[in-house]
């Protein structure tokens, strides 16, 4: 028969989790007292670690769109490039810029612009796998990191995102607003640095804008 001791880990009514200890024979009273003393020493460092994790998440999250932010992008991109090189895996990147975003702000106001940003972020996230990572890196600019995916797969994903944005109608007050986006795609190549990898996708995105917008260009 298994014997167990179960403790709810709480600090000031905040539930941090639950700890269960099991073994084949009963815990003595002295052992239980020792366990409870050790748990008292554990609980506040555990709370501090939880608070630190929450603060880190807030620091790396764009509050408006609930995507990762530019600070997160800089750190995650380096990590993903290192992993792709070390394990000889494909890594692709998608740059996305909302078309005519300044006109949306000018015509309908900045609050409408915020709603448009949140809407585009939602369309992006709806099309991603759990391993794909989306960032808002500028005013109306987003980046998606696509691991284990070559440029053809990333271009297909970018096209799905583009179409999803185009087909959605944004309702703002009495206004119905159509949004589109221009997307650039690149895949990590041998010898790429962070800068060359990013600049290639960024240049492809601007080429898409200069070619008439609402399209995907891969380089």
Image (cartoon, grey):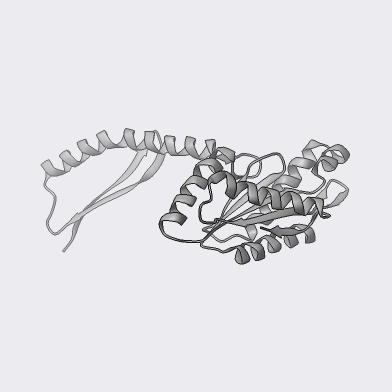
Residue 26 visible in the shown view: yes
Query: Looking at the image, which is closer to me, 131 or 151?
Result: 151
Work out which quarter of the rendered image holds the N terminus and state it.
bottom left
Q: Is residue 28 left or right of residue 115?
A: left
Which corner quadrant of the image does residue 188 belong to?
A: bottom right
Work out which quarter of the rendered image holds the C terminus and state it.
bottom right
In this rendering, is residue 3 above or below 36? below
| Residue 105 placement (x, y as % from top left) | 82, 39
Residue 120 visible in the shown view: no
Query: Looking at the image, which is closer to me, 172 or 35?
Result: 172
| Residue 123 placement (x, y as % from top left) | 69, 56
Q: Is residue 2 left or right of residue 185?
A: left
| Residue located 69% across and 45% down the image | 141
| Residue 36 placement (x, y as % from top left) | 22, 39
Query: Looking at the image, which is closer to me, 93 or 19?
Result: 93
| Residue located 78% across and 59% down the image | 166
| Residue located 60% across and 47% down the image | 198
Q: How many marks?
A: 0
Q: Is residue 83 left or right of residue 162?
A: left
| Residue located 51% across and 52% down the image | 191
| Residue 75 placement (x, y as % from top left) | 50, 42
Q: Is residue 135 left or right of residue 20?
A: right
In this rendering, is residue 186 above or below 113? below
């Amino acid at each position: 028969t298994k014997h167990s001791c179960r403790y709810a880990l709480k600090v000031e009514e905040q539930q941090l989790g639950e700890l269960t200890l099991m073994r084949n024979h009963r815990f003595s009273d002295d052992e239980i007292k020792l366990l409870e003393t050790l748990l008292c020493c554990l609980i506040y460092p555990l709370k501090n670690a939880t608070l630190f994790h929450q603060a880190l998440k807030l620091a790396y999250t764009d509050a408006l769109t609930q995507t990762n932010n530019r600070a997160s992008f800089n750190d995650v991109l380096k990590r993903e490039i290192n992993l792709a090189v070390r394990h000889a895996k494909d890594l692709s990147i998608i740059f996305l810029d909302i078309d005519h975003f300044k006109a949306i702000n000018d015509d309908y106001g900045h609050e409408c612009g915020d709603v448009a940003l949140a809407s585009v972020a939602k369309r992006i996230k709806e099309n991603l796998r759990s391993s794909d990572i989306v960032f808002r890196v500028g005013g109306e600019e987003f980046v998606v990191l696509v691991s284990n995916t070559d440029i053809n797969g990333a271009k297909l994903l970018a096209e799905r995102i583009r179409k999803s944005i185009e087909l959605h109608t944004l309702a703002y007050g009495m206004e119905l607003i159509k949004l589109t986006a221009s997307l650039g795609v690149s895949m990590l190549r041998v010898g790429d640095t962070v800068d060359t990898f990013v600049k290639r996708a960024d240049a492809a995105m601007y080429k898409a804008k200069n070619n008439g917008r609402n399209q995907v260009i891969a380089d």
